[in-house]
Image (cartoon, rainbow, N blue to C red):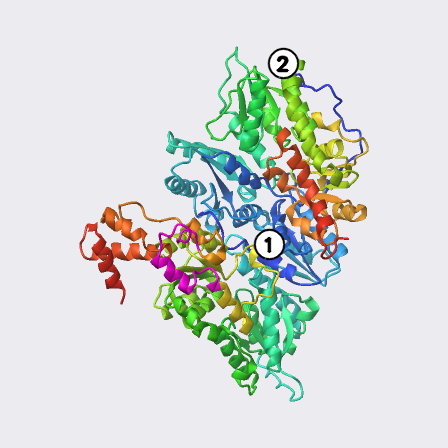
Amino acid sequence: MSSVIASSVGEHHPGPQTQERGQRAVFCGLTSIIWLHRRIQDAFFLVVGSRTCAHLIQSAAGVMIFAEPRFATAILGERDLAGMADCHEELDRVVSELIARRSGINRLFLVGSCPSEVIKLDLETAAAKLQVKHENRVRISAFSGSGIETTFTQGEDQCLKSTVAELPALGASEDNLIVLGTVSDIVEDQFRRLFDELDIKNVHFYPGRKAGDLPAVGKGTRVIAAQPFVGETARALIESGAELISAPFPLGAEGSKAWFEAAAEAYGVDSERTQQVLEMPYQRAKRAVSVHRSKLEGKRIHFLPDSQLEIPMARFLSEECGLSVNEIGTPFHDQLMMRGELARLPQDVPMVEGQDLDPALARVRAARPDLTVCGMGIANALESEGLRTKWSIELVFSPVQGFDQAGDLAGLFAKPLAREEILEVGSWS
Amino acid sequence: MELTLWTYEGPPHVGAIRVAASMRDVHLMLHSPQGDTYADLLFTMIEREGRRPPVTYTTFQARDLGSSTAEMVVNSLRESAERFKPQVLMVADSCTAELIQDQPGALALGADLPVPVIPLEMAAYTRKENWGAAETFYQLVRGLLSRQAPPPGSERPPRDANTRPSVNLLGPTKLGFRCRDDVVEIERLLNSMGVDVNVVAPLGASPQDLQAIPKADANVNLCPEVSDLTCSWLARTFGMPTISTIPMGWGATRDFIAEVAATLDLDINVDAVGESRLPWYSRSIDSTYLTGKRVFVFADGSHAIAAARVARDEMGFEVVGLGTYSRERARDVRAAAKEYGLEALITDNYLEVEAKVQELQPEMVLGTQMERHIAKRLGIPCAVISTPAHVQDYPARYSPQMGFEGANVLFDTWVHPLIMGLEEHLLHMFRDDFEFNDSVGPSHLGSEGEGARAQDTSSGHQADDGAVVWAFEAEKELKKIPFFVRGKARRNTERFAVEHGLTTIEVDTLYDAKAHFSN
């Protein structure tokens, strides 16, 4: 693929790879709304779905948020399903109600769910109709976060992909860099400072803090992914002329360094200059990671499929923290997005794509790893069997990217192990 | 289509999972898309369960639609039966599966499984979580017991004089409000009356235990949201009487004892069964400050009704609002509200509840996790009395709501968020003290007390209805009133001004209103 700027390392993971099909224990893509509605401060997410959808989002969020949230559910009732009520008219009513209520909203996403997909409710057409009605007031579009089509973090990919068509065209003589995938505000600020020092200009974070912060895209666009779960958006940008910079994800000292190096290389930044700029944050990140290394070194870790961050996390932990990786489960394996990661993984790590929950849990029980990274529904069940766990959702909800978060990232994994050493009550083994 | 921000109840299949998760040796096969497995975390996170609920989800995806979803159902059923070897396998659809009409119940009955099957119809688009729990429990009990049913019209044989009387405690479930401790407390209470507990269900029961239900003399309908349907079926089919007083609060616990005694024909002196500290604590001089505190009560039906009674009769509060999110209990709550001279608020719309609390400006809210958020935003003290609740409402300590110990717990829990007697007076007197003022909040709640977060709901000099304006001095005087009564004072003054045709509120208007409303 000529539109991918390949890294110098090999592309394929040589270890054993299997696919599993069976019961999955993952969130659906609607869960992405929990961070997207905080990231894009003037966007509102209206799920068109069932009571289950509403219940999922509020339960997965863990705590209910203090202020009125920037998301809601239009719950389909029997009248909608039986055709007694016209879904488009109903949606029209609900959206008008919502827009009247929330004056600060500039962008409304109608979010498809399992029930809306199954009854083939065409939300894109609905959004286009509603757009005419609310023109000049709010931009309206649709994407799917349904569980039959997306898992967990894929909701963000669908959301971003749905906006690619709106991106303005980049002028023929211009160039820009798109950093793709949600990062926290503080990470964005840190990254901007480093890009400035590298003299890389026209950097856009996508999604931005405002719904209107849309980057232009064209032949002069380079894309670098900050998150592994934005593959379809990356492909859509490539189709619009952009080049994808292949790099490991900016996790850990090494991952962050390689990520910035890849960007700098693509921009033809003098490599001495690059090393000069990155040296201080890189050394600082290594020092911060080393604080946790004694807790982590030699420990065995097991990843159950959840957030798509499994592969880069396994790479960081084996490369920089001295853990051995027992198994990497991942909901799906996007070869394009993982090009920069695979060659950095230890050769013999078994990788499992998809899931069959009970056999997967049986492997965890048989291996008894020191730490299992898994979804919230499973963690306490494993803890009660004496197995230490880390919730994968924390890896999505906390600022972990970049040099100055590398120590925090290692700390997230070290904490459960440290806790085991501290506690003098009960037993974990 | 209904616009929802937060929902009080989950979908009905979550109710089915609650029943399954409460029991032993049952398994639920839920036909559902990937994503619906989030329900696991309700149990493992909120209630800190050390096991996943006994549920297998088919987790179908788009690629399975139209071809293999029915096959997935049958495979999941076979695997569940084989792997978990339950005494009973329940089968249900979640909302999406209901639309694709694979009829998993029929598939299960036709699959020749090595285990009894109970199919459930969850009606995802018309019903909600508590209904789902009630329906599941009923189908399970009926499925297991209908073959034992005596011919209609048979007389129930009288209890053998040599056997101790016994009852079943029906309704408690996982994720119910303090069910774990209420069961212990009520069992203890019944034992002290010489009454045995035959079966507790669903909580902790196996299908085999359910088969023993008819051996008891009566059923205690402990959590009517879950057990109402089952109790009335048992009454109709087995002639088992239902004991329906919810023993929450001192008075209701005594009524419960009396109802148990009457139902089982026991000669019992209520005073000898047990006692609570609530009556004395409430009569002790410190509690005078509780008198007439205006409380707003919103909960599931049974907790709302019980809490209102405790609030008025046992704490000396004034109940200014009463409501429920549970439409199935609406009739009972409406009837109860009448006794307090109120119109019940029946809604599952969080925003309507918030608007009502804002309008009434109560001094305390007794509600759910939702009302905790509303109260926090409005700076009103709040105690949680009902589901939906959060992890902190599943405490490590023994903390029942029912029985005599439950009455003690209610007293403590409801008094705790309030500002105590003399402290309240000192705040009135010296509210400009730079360290000790109402924005600091109650001293026993630390610097993060509710007062610190209280938002002044005033909209500046303009009153809410736009017709009356606050003069600068009057506004300043209003701010001298401690926050926990300021909202009420503001509202009363504006009402007074409107009623008297005044357009500007002066300092004197404030005190005229105070005098007017003080009687």
From the viewer's perspective, is residue A146 above or below residue B394? above
Label 2: state its secondary structure: loop
Q: Residue at x 68, y 26 (%)?
A: A283
Q: Is residue B177 magenta?
A: no
Query: A174 left or right of B506?
Result: right
Q: Position of residue A148 (x, y in %)?
A: 61, 41
- For the question of whether residue A79 can be seen, the reply is yes
Q: Position of residue A327 (x, y in %)?
A: 77, 39
The circle drawn on residue A416 is none
Q: Position of residue A140 (x, y in %)?
A: 45, 33
Q: CA distance from mark 2 to mark 1?
A: 51 Å
Same chain shared by disc 2 and disc 1: no
In the image, the segment drawn in magenta is: B414-441
Q: According to the image, label 2 marks what residue?
A: A269
Closer to the camera in the image, B129 or A195: A195
Q: According to the image, label 1 marks what residue?
A: B46
Please identify the dominant SS of the magenta region: loop
Q: Residues within 10 Å of mark 1 (few under 14, many from 20)?
A: some
Label 1: state its secondary structure: helix
Q: Residue at x 58, y 59 (%)?
A: B394
Q: Amino acid at mark 1?
A: Ile
Query: B183 left or right of A90?
Result: right
* Residue at the extreme left of the image, as rendered: B501
State if disc 1 and disc 2 touch (CB < 8 Å).
no
Label 1 lies in what chain? B
Label 2 lies in what chain? A
Q: Residue at x 77, y 44 (%)?
A: A369
